[in-house]
Image (tube, grey):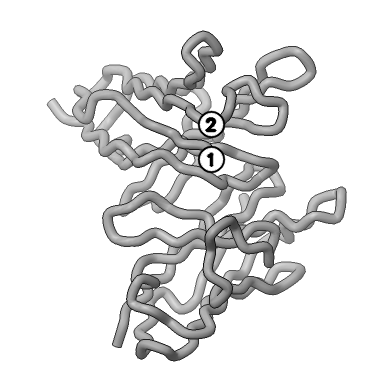
């Protein structure tokens, strides 16, 4: 089965400073149609996961532009250009393919320094 | 904008069947551009996808994770525009927060509020 490995597992960032989270997959999420089904989610304390990024680099509706996704092959990155207080939570990467779908990383906890 | 509202008991006895429902507003369970998934979250397993259903080529399709395939049923209900999860023969290891979600081509773009289900006598 696919294994998603995130690093770091925890991150302490000063307000206004950038943050970066890495996600490595044991198998490429590249689909036969050329799409790469790699998503990023944010889970604030006490809330459901919220999808931030889909297909590596596309921001979801209402997601601030300080969030960006990049990567290819088996290595992907989520970046926050300037961390705000509301960004506190746990961030997950998720691979959509190959089967079985929807394998999640173990999560990266972001806190404010 | 789609909204997913979950309902169901928060306590299930061991060996019994866990049952949850996810009501859909702003979309249709029989949409030809969406699937409907259940995911759970626990400290020991993290986020774990359980299965999904979708309507395609004039029939309902079901896909389940290997880990629960022998115990899970996901049922769509077009008259009520919702879908349900049944997980049988539960043990304390099935204690988790359960989420329903909409799936737009391998993209879980909308999630329900979550239901904490505890398996205990």
Q: In what quadrant of the picture does the C terminus of chain A appear?
A: bottom left
Q: Which residue is mark 2?
A: B26
The numbered mark 2 sits on a residue in which chain?
A: B
Query: Residue placed farthest to the right in the image?
Result: A33
**Mark 1 and mark 2 in contact (Cβ < 8 Å)?**
yes
Task: State left or right for residue A93 relative to residue B115.
Answer: right
In the rendering, at what x and y percent does residue A91 appear?
A: 45, 65
Residue located 59% across and 57% down the image: A60
- Name which residue lies at 31% across and 26% down: B7
Q: In this orientation, which residue lies closer to the viewer: A54 or A9? A: A54
Circle 1 crowding by C-alpha within 10 Å: few under 14, some 14–19, many from 20: few
User: Residue placed farthest to the left in the image?
Assistant: B121
Total marks drawn?
2
Q: Nearer the viewer, residue A106 or B58?
A: B58
Output the chain of dot 1.
Answer: B
Camera sees residue B86: yes
Q: Earlier in the sequence, mark 2 or mark 1?
A: 1
Residue A65 x %, y %:
58, 73
Q: Quadrant of residue A11?
A: bottom left
Residue at image location 44% in from the left, 21% down from the top: B84
Q: Which mark is residue A74?
A: none
Viewer can see residue A105: no
Find numbered disc 2 in the image and state the secondary structure of the residue it sits on. loop
Q: Which residue matches tag 1?
A: B1
Give the spatial CA distance, label 2 vs label 1: 6 Å
A29 up-or-down from B72: above or below: below
Residue at 48% x, 20% y is B82
Q: Residue B18 falls in which quadrant of the image?
A: top left
Q: Residue furthest top?
A: B79
């Amino acid at each position: 089965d696919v294994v998603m490995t995130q690093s770091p597992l925890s991150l302490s960032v000063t307000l206004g400073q950038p943050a970066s989270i890495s996600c490595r997959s044991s198998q490429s999420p590249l689909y036969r149609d050329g799409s790469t089904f790699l998503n990023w989610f944010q889970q604030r304390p006490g809330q459901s996961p919220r999808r931030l990024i889909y297909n590596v680099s596309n921001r979801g509706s209402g997601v601030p532009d300080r969030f960006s996704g990049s990567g290819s092959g088996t290595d992907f990155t989520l970046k926050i250009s300037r961390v705000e207080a509301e960004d506190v939570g746990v961030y997950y990467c998720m691979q959509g393919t190959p089967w079985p779908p929807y394998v999640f990383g173990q999560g990266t906890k972001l806190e404010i320094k | 904008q789609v909204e997913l509202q979950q309902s169901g008991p928060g306590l299930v006895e061991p060996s019994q069947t866990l049952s949850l429902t996810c009501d859909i507003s702003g979309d249709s369970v029989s949409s030809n551009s969406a699937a409907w998934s259940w995911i759970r979250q626990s400290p020991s397993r993290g986020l774990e996808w359980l299965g999904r259903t979708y309507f395609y080529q004039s029939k309902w399709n079901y896909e389940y994770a290997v880990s629960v395939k022998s115990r899970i049923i996901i049922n769509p209900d077009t008259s009520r525009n919702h879908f349900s999860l049944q997980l049988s023969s539960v043990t304390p290891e099935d204690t988790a927060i359960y989420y329903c979600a909409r799936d737009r081509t391998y993209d879980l773009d909308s999630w329900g509020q979550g239901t904490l289900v505890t398996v205990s006598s």
